[in-house]
Structure formats: structure tokens, C-alpha cells
Amino acid sequence: MSSAAESLPARSQRRSVNAPLLLLVGSVALYIGVALATGQSMMLHVEGIVGLLQRMVGLGIVAVGQTFAILAGSIDLSVANMISVAAVLASFIMQGRPDMMLPAVAAVLAVSAVVGVVNGALISRLQVNPLIATLGVGLVLQGLLSASFTNFAGSVPPEFQAFAYGALGPAPYSVIGLFVLALAASLLLRATKFGAHLYAVGGNAEGARLAGIRTDLVTIGAHVLCSLCAGLTGLYLASRLRSGAPWVGRDGVYDLESIAVVVIGGTLLAGGRGGVWGTLAGVLLFAVLDASFNMLGVSAYSKLVLRGAIVIAAVAAYTFRSRDLVA
Amino acid sequence: MAVSGPLALEMAHITKTFPAVRALDDVSFACLRGEVHALCGENGAGKSTLIKILGGAYHPDGGKILLDGRPVAFSHPLAARNAGVSIIHQELSLLPYRTVAENIFLGIEPTRYGMLDRGRMRADSQRLLIRLGASIAPDADVGDLSIAQQQVVEIAKALAIDARILVMDEPTAALERTEAARLLDLVKRLSGEGVTIIYVSHRMPEIQAIADRVTVLKDGRTVMTAPIAEASTAKLVRAMVGRDLADFYPPPAAKPPGAPALTIRGGANGRLAGVDLFVRRGEIVGVAGLEGSGKSELGRAIAGDEPFERGTMEIAGKAGVPRRPREAVEAGIGRLSEDRKREGLLMQQSLRDNAALIQRAFAPSLGPPSAEPMTVGATDDRLRRLDVRAASFEQEARQLSGGNQQKVIVSRWLARDPEVLVFAEPTRGVDVAAKAAIYKIMRDLADRGRAILMISSDLPEIVGVSDRIVVMREGHIAGELPGGAGEEEIMAIAVAHDEPAEAATQ
């Protein structure tokens, strides 16, 4: 069988372009270009850049979670509602009292985890389509929340606001937190069994099952991580807004935007391929677009148009690039 | 029959009933350690049910399974895997975007301090691949490998769990001849190392070449278990279908062929160069060639899927190169893709919907709902005429056997009745009886004045069915042989080199 020596076919060079890197370079270039062109060079100083990174935090945290769901071949449409629930729950429990910070955070994380288990179990055990399952769970969450609260509920103590406003030297805690979270997520995906199994379930669920992987547990795990990240985003928003209101998640369009940045970052919507750093690059691109439009003084509505166009262009570009692979 | 040596596996009196059908009826099946045991039978004979029971995917209603003399009961595929039973399914279950090492150790990843031990995965994969005589890089993405290399990765995956019983389900179905030969070598070597191999295949020459013993299932029962020396191909076919091989291939053309229905001159595109070809009414032209020779690309080009960019075509007397599948169909060309699942069937839709697809594609958008493509009468007639066997024509296409699926696709084209029909790998994954039926359909079409182009990697099929054989190599037609030419002659043309200098050094 030594004649079996075969060299790899030439098409193995197809991934010569690294999508996250390309996005990163492109976003940075766009930001610098717009700042220089509009003569707002202070945007390139430390405060400007910190401001830019701070724009990433809210969407960034939930998008890291969404990456897990999508990599597993699933999707989570309930994150926006989960964010509202988390923000309201946190500020309602705290009522401005520092000693209630820990119980509030614990309660938010526990509720998030339960929502993740419910999502994951609906999808993997009851075989409900992920779009429908998470849409339904999201509606239920929103309904319960809106029935109980109509406005800002309670408040968070100043100590808790440090999450959003505090800083270590020039670097805000929130930005550091986002990158630590991304690093941990990337490590989980790259270096653990759970990560390997997540890619397997997203890439070929039946193949993974036949290899002896408990695919249902993997799917549930991915959704728990996704919901926990949404819960964290809710805590961050409560800290930044100093209170939680039942519309903060929906207003941020965190459900669709988190899916958009994951896909822009090169993760296959079908699952099985992609990663966290691409997602962060996608979040950076959105933050740069926001900042650039502000510098250019363009209306918020044209911003939406451009975001939509970019999502479509990115997916089209990825599909085009991988066509010979699929065919 | 005397069985010598220790039994690695014994499945005794296995019974399995599904709601509508008794799939296995008191089947007994035993393998010696290190033997290659071929398992044959038509689709629906019960092979896959038996294998799924062995693999822990199904539970038997009755009977017992003994591994090395110890009774076992698998509740989950994982349990079978842990007991050393590994099954390589026909549709490979590899992850294209993950590396070779990640695939080999899927589900059994080694860890160190809770983290994946990638170094060990890589080194162990390398060791397994070298043992298999393959030079595949553990860090390569599986999606970049050829099908043959992916098969080797599947086998390495089995060795990684120390499989003592390896089930291979039609492993050579998608392989070229030389690749298949290498795989067979590998199978022999593994059995020499003491691995018991259960080899499921429709290919008689392969079974004759590597099996030590063979078991034939028919209608859920064991009809024969014998050493291979006592099981000639004729005897095996008879056991499987209950009739003789002589009836297997269709008779030659009833009358001499007519005028060309398809003529290609200088056809070329990115994958093809200088293709000159004609197919006459009333003849079946077989197209042979290795993988990458351009034979499937030829079918795509003719059908306007990946059209010719240069050259001329004449279809039923009219000149013009179809640029899209729709143009090709309008010009009078039909093509049955080699990949029924991906390019042929609407898996979740009924047989009727599948059979009416082409007609519906060309039906007027605002036609009355009582018009033919929307009703069942004529569609059902065609399905019946082709002897499509299903519980009901409302059954979903995915529930049918390969042979019946192929017949449904043929019936779809019959409704349009094109001048030229291109059959790509018409009997891939189709059982023996259905094969004979499909050959007969092709011959009947030719006798009715249609021109048939049959693209196939199955040489006995090329030899047995074609009136004329063209052999492709490196994107062009390298030679032509009369019907009935030997497989060796075909291979000689298929593997030759175009540069004489290179050929001389061989």
C-alpha cells in the first residue's frame, strides 16, 4: 500500500485569505481614513479608540454567545429578550443596594442558564426547529417581562456601574471583560473536547452521533453558553443605563445584529466552521461604521441601509469563495 | 459447513420487525477472527438492518449477539463502538472543515489537564495513517482530500478505537478502479492483522477477490453462507435474485443505429478540450474513464450545466450549444445525474411530485389545474410502466431504495421524451435486480429511436451494455472501442499518457 502515497490536491490552497484578519484590517483602515478625511484626528487618540472599543461591548458579548449557537448548527433568536429580562431582573433585585449585587448577578446567570437549557432541550430533545424554538421562547420571555414591568424598574448601585464606567488605566473594565470573554471562548472552542464536539455536531450531526458524541448535550451546552452571554450583556446594559427597562434588548436589535456579525465574521450559518475572532472582527466593523457615520454626520437610517448591504455582501462573498468546495 | 478457528462475532436467530415489514427473519451470521466476510443481497434484503443492529442503532426483537463468545446488547452506537465494532457507512460521516486528526479522534479526543492533547492526536494519527500506508497529512482539512483518501481516514478512525470488527458498506462505490484496488489491498492487510471485516458490496469481482466467505441475504433470510471458493459469481447472483446472470445485461440493439441525434465538434471548456463525439438514434454509447478524466464534466457540458465554451453542437438536427439546463432540455436533452440525492430527487416530496418535475418546469405558469402535469393519471401510468415499487406513489422519495429512486427519475424524463438521454452512473448504489431493470429501460429507449449516452465508472456495465464505447482521458476523448470490448482494452486507453516521452520511461 505504499503506492497509496498521494499528494493533496491543489485546491487545498483555497483558504489563503484569512477572513477575520481581512475584516480587521479593513475596519481599521476605514476608521483611520474617515477620521483623517473629516479632520477629526482626536478620534485616533487614546480616548477616541477607547470610545470605539466601548461601542463593541454590548453587541460583542452577546455575539460571542451567538457564535456558539450557530457553530452548533443552531441559532438563537431569544437573546434580545433574554437581555431585557437580565437587565430588568438585575436592577429590580438590586434596588440601588450594593449588598444585593451578588444575589442579583447570581439570579440573572441562573435564569439565563435555565433559558439556555430550555432552548437547547426544545431543539435537541423535542426536535423543534431552532428558529421556531428560540423565537417562541423569546416571545414568552418578552410577554412575562412586559406583563410585570412597564418602565425602568429599580436601579443599580454606583458600585455596579463600575462595570460599564470603571477603567484600569486607559482600558475600561468592560472592554477588558469582552476580550477576556472572547479569549476564553476561543480557548473553549480550540482546546477542549466540548469545542471539538461542537464543531462536529454543527458539521454533521448524524456523523457526530454515530461517533458516540452525546449531540443533545452539546446542543444544550451551546445554548446555555449563548444565553449566559445574553445575560451578561443584560447586566452590562443595566450597569451602563443605571437601570433596566423591558425594551433595552429589542431596541438594540441584539438578536439579528448578533447573527449578522457572526456570519460576517466567517462562521457558516449552517454550522461546523468559524470562530470567535471572526465574530469580534464583525463587531468591530459595525462599531467602526457607527463611529464613521457619526464623524461624517450621516443619519442613523442610512447606517441601517449600509449594515444590511454589508451583511448580504459578506455572505455572498463567502458563498462565492467556497463554491468549488461545495460543488 | 465446518467453521474453524475462534468466532469473533456470532449473530444468532436475529429477528427484527418494523411496523409494515419483517426486515429480518431468524437470521444467523457468524464471522471468524481475521476473516473477510462478504455480505450480499439486494437492497431491501435486510443487510442494512442487520448492520444497524450490529452497530447498536437498532435493537433486535429476538436473537442474540456474541462477541468473542460473550453475549452483548448494544443500547446505543457508542456501546457498539466501545465493544470494538466500527461501521463505515456508505455516506462518509467525516467533517469536511476539520482536520484529519480531529476527524480520526472524533468522540475519543485525548486530553491533558482538561485540554485537547493536539500533539498526541497528530502523532497518533500519523502513526495510524502510516500503518495504512497512506501519506495524508494529519493537519490537512478532510474536505481537501479525495474520496479515496477520505475512505482511508474512515478506516483510521476505526483503528483509533481498536476496532476488532469493521463493517464496510460499499466502500468502493465512489472509487475509481485503481483506488478501489488499493482499498482492497488494505482490507486484506487489516484482516491479516486479525481485524474481522464484514464487507458489504454489490460488486462481484471484488467479493471474489477478497472475501474468505460470503453470506447472502434475501427477503430478510439467510439463503447461503459458503467459502468463496464454493460461491461462483453466477451462484451468488442466483442466490440474490433467483435467476441467472445471462439475463442480467440487455440484448444488443435490435437494428442498426440511425442518424446522429447528438453531434459535438471541438467541445471545450475549463475541464474539457477538443471533444468530438456523436451519438446515433438507437444506440447506447458508453463513456468510460478514470476519475478526473472529464467524463462527468462531459455529461454536465452536454446538459448545459457547465456548458461548452467553444466548439459546436447539433441536437436532433439543430445547431446550438445549450448554455443552461433549461436550454438543453428544450433542445431535446435529458440528463440523469450521478448524484441522485443532491441533484436528482426532491427527497421529502412524493414520487408523483418527483416524476412530474420536468413537465411542471415546462408547464405554462397559468395553466388550468386539471392539466396533465398537475394531475396524477399519466404520471402514475409512467411510474407503473417502469415498475416502481412503493407502498404508494404518495410515499416520500427518500424512503425508496436506490433502484426505485432511479426509476422515478427516469419516469420524470419519459414524460418529456427527449431525443438524447445522458445517464451518469445509472446504477450506482442500485441492487442487482434493479440494475437489470434499468439496463432494460435504456435498451428499450434506444430501440424506440432515442440516443443514449451512458457515463459510468463501472467497467462490467460499460462492457455489458454499450453498443459503442468511448474512453476519456485528461478532458478529451482518447479512444473508441466497439461494444463488447474487453475491460483491459478500455483501461489501457484510460490510463495511457498523452506525452509519449513520459510513456516511454514507464
Image (cartoon, rainbow, N blue to C red):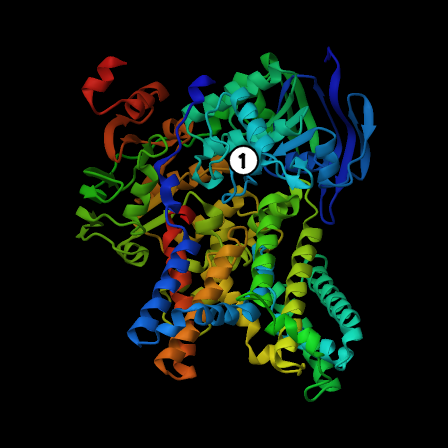
* Residue B212 visible within the image: no
Quarter-of-image position of residue A116: bottom right
Q: Relative to the observer, which residue lies in front, A247 or B354? A: A247
Q: Amino acid at mark 1?
A: Asp
Residue at the spot 43% in from the left edge and 37% down from the top edge: B439
* x and y, in percent, of residue A145 in the image: 72, 81
Q: Relative to the observer, which residue lies in front, A242 or B153? A: A242
* Residue A265 visible within the image: yes
Relative height, residue B371 to residue B147 (above, below): below
Residue at the spot 80% in from the left edge and 74% down from the top edge: A99
Quarter-of-image position of residue B225: top right
Residue linked to disc 1:
B431
Q: Relative to the observer, which residue lies in front, B444 or B466? A: B466
Relative height, residue B200 to residue A231 (above, below): above
SS of the residue under disc 1: loop
* x and y, in percent, of residue B173 in the image: 49, 33
Question: Does residue A109 appear to the left or right of A46 in the view shown?
Answer: right
Quarter-of-image position of residue A168: bottom right
Question: Does residue A296 appear to the left or right of A188 in the view shown?
Answer: left
* x and y, in percent, of residue A300 in the image: 43, 82
Relative height, residue A123 to residue A95 (above, below): above
Relative height, residue A95 to residue A262 (above, below): below
Question: Does residue A111 appear to the left or right of A317 in the view shown?
Answer: right
Q: Relative to the observer, which residue lies in front, A191 or A175? A: A175
Question: Does residue A254 appear to the left or right of B333 in the view shown?
Answer: right
Q: Chain of mark 1?
A: B
Residue at the spot 54% in from the left edge and 59% down from the top edge: B349
* x and y, in percent, of residue A290 in the image: 43, 75
Q: Residue furthest bottom?
A: A150
Q: Label 1: few (<14), some or many (≥20) within 10 Å?
A: many
